[in-house]
Image (cartoon, coloured by chain):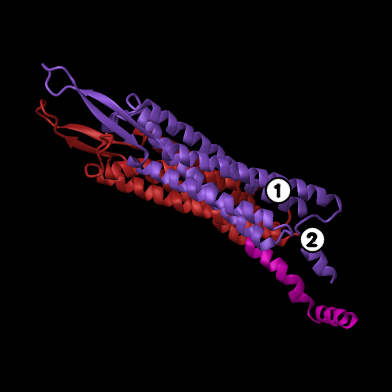
Chain colours: A red, B purple
Amino acid sequence: MATTYTSETEKVAAAPPPETRAPAKKAHTFALAEVVLRFLLFASGLVAVLVMVTSKQTKYLSVPGIPYKIPRSAVFDHSPAFIYFVAALSVAGFYGLITTLFSLYALIKPGCCPKVLSHFVIFDVLLLGIVASATGSGGAVAYIGLKGNKYVNWGKICHMYGDFCKHVGASIAVSLFGSVILVLLVLLSIHSLSKRIPK
Amino acid sequence: MESQYKGSYSNGGVESGGVANRRKMRGCDVVLRFLALALTLTAAVVLGVDKQNTTVAVTLVPTLPPVNVPVTAKWHHLSAFVFFVVANAIACAHAAISLALTLANRSGKKGITMIVVLFDLVMVALLFSGVGAAASIGVMGFEGNSHVQWKKVCNVFGKFCHQAAAAIGLSGVAALVFFLLVALATWNLHKKH
């Protein structure tokens, strides 16, 4: 017991810099990864909202009884699910922006505000719920638009408004990416928290 | 020796008061998991048995009296409801397995705890997206959408819609319970830090 103890101390004394620098370096890597992930969250929220908002498509359809064609447009705010989607993704993007700035500040000045940073994890889980539900609701409506439903006579619309549907699909894919980013963020926070527990 | 002893205890608490606290936490965890199990099971079953037969009066020819046509609403006619039931079934299975793991894992092995938290997190995402999908289709059924001529169906299938709404509400509470489980786990880590 004693000999192993001395050999341990000798080892530590022989090579102190890597022993002490390794956890600090790891923590730095974690902080850097957190900044990158938060920035990706902000970017995906922004892209999803922009793609969804710019999805307007106007078609000129002929209606029986009227000699000329009338314009009919497909806009995202015709469906409450897409409105919820835009609201939720805006919140996620805004949150991503704020937390990116915070974690960048913490990266530059290590140990400035650990209390604030460590409480982000709860909000991350909350945002994960919001973004996941937005993805689900947008995806469900978009699926009906793509395939239609013959049981309740909801006809598909994507053969008429192809561009609109492409925009909506791309936006939903980006928000799915955003929810994966949120899962990774929470896992990273939990992992780094459990690493910092004093043994 | 010393580090081993502390290592096996590191999941509990550093002080002696931590043991009682830890037991309370574990009890809270088990109760929440049981609640999640019950809620997801109920939600899946309530929507899974949802079916309604009714008749709709259809006028084929304006001069003749309307003809009564039998129509049926089933939960698997809508793909969003299928996703909802599958998501709830998966969450229910996870709740059962993690309940067993938590009860078996008395010593508080860190690896098992981390895996359970990881899957809790996935269940939060899965349940919330299932609730979102089913709720958006449910709103469409209640309100319809005049822009694309999707007519509302809940004036015909009243009982079906109410049962679906109950299932969505139950699943929403279950999703919140999973959220609380993840929050509890992170809070636990904070206390030990």
Question: Quick one: SS at disc 2?
Answer: helix
The residue located at (68%, 53%) in the rendering is: B103
Q: Amino acid at mark 1?
A: Trp
Q: Residue at x 44, y 44 (%)?
A: B85
Q: In the rendered view, tell whether residue B190 sits above or below residue A14.
A: above
* Residue named by callout 2: B9
Q: CA distance from mark 2 to mark 1?
A: 18 Å
Decide which of B92, B78 is in the foreground and name it.
B92
The vertical placement of B153 against B190, above or below, is: above
A15 falls in the magenta region: yes
> Could you say which quadrant of the image residue A95 lies in?
top right
| Residue located beneath label 1 in the image | B187
Query: Residue at position x 65%, y 53% from top?
Result: A105
Q: Chain of mark 1?
A: B
**Disc 2 or disc 1, which is closer to the eye?**
2
Q: Reading the chain from its start, which is encountered first: label 2 or label 1?
A: 2
What amino acid is labelled 2 in the image? Tyr
- Residue stretch rendered in magenta on the structure: A1-30
Q: Secondary structure at mark 1?
A: helix
Please state, as top left, top right, bottom left or bottom right, where the N terminus of chain B lies in the image: bottom right
